[in-house]
Image (tube, rainbow, N blue to C red):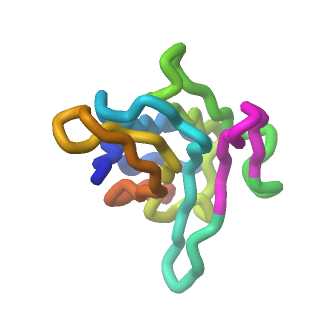
Amino acid sequence: QVQLVESGGGSVQPGGSLRLSCTAPAKVFKVNNMGWYRQGPGKQRDLVAGFTESGTTNYADTVKGRFTLSRDNFETTMYLQMNSLEPDDTAVYFCYAHVGYYTNGATARSWGGFWGDGILVNVSS
């Protein structure tokens, strides 16, 4: 299994900024696609922003112009810079990645999609 590690959430006032990070472990040798989803109170989990396998970036209409997705040179750490935060951005944010990873002490390879545990972003005055 692959454990995605999320960080950077917290509480902020409207108009403020936060940066979320998501890191895949070293046993991951290939990231096919990776993105952030969020689930607000009483709502379904929806895509916020993500990288496709071809490297293009997609954003939800509600965050375009405010959120920016980026990743490191190894493409195993992804960042979501969130600016001009609004109360409607309050949610638990989940990292998702479909990856190739080593198993059995790096003697075999497997593929799968994995979720992080989620991190709370709270925007309120």
Displayed quadrant of residue 22: top left
Residue 66 position (above or below residue 45): above
Q: Which residues are magenta?
A: 47-59
- Residue 65 place in picture, x, y as percent: 80, 38
Displayed quadrant of residue 105: top left
Magenta stretch, overall SS: strand
* Residue at 67 percent of width and 40 percent of height: 51
Residue 108 position (above or below residue 73): below
- Residue 59 place in picture, x, y as percent: 76, 48
- Residue 11 place in picture, x, y as percent: 39, 50
Q: Nearer the viewer, residue 1 or 105?
A: 105
Is residue 61 shown left or right of residue 34? right
* Residue at 45 percent of width and 47 percent of height: 12
Q: Nearer the viewer, residue 122 or 118?
A: 118
Q: Can the viewer see residue 115 in this picture?
A: yes
**Residue 57 among magenta residues:** yes
- Residue found farthest to the left: 105
Is residue 71 shown left or right of residue 49? left
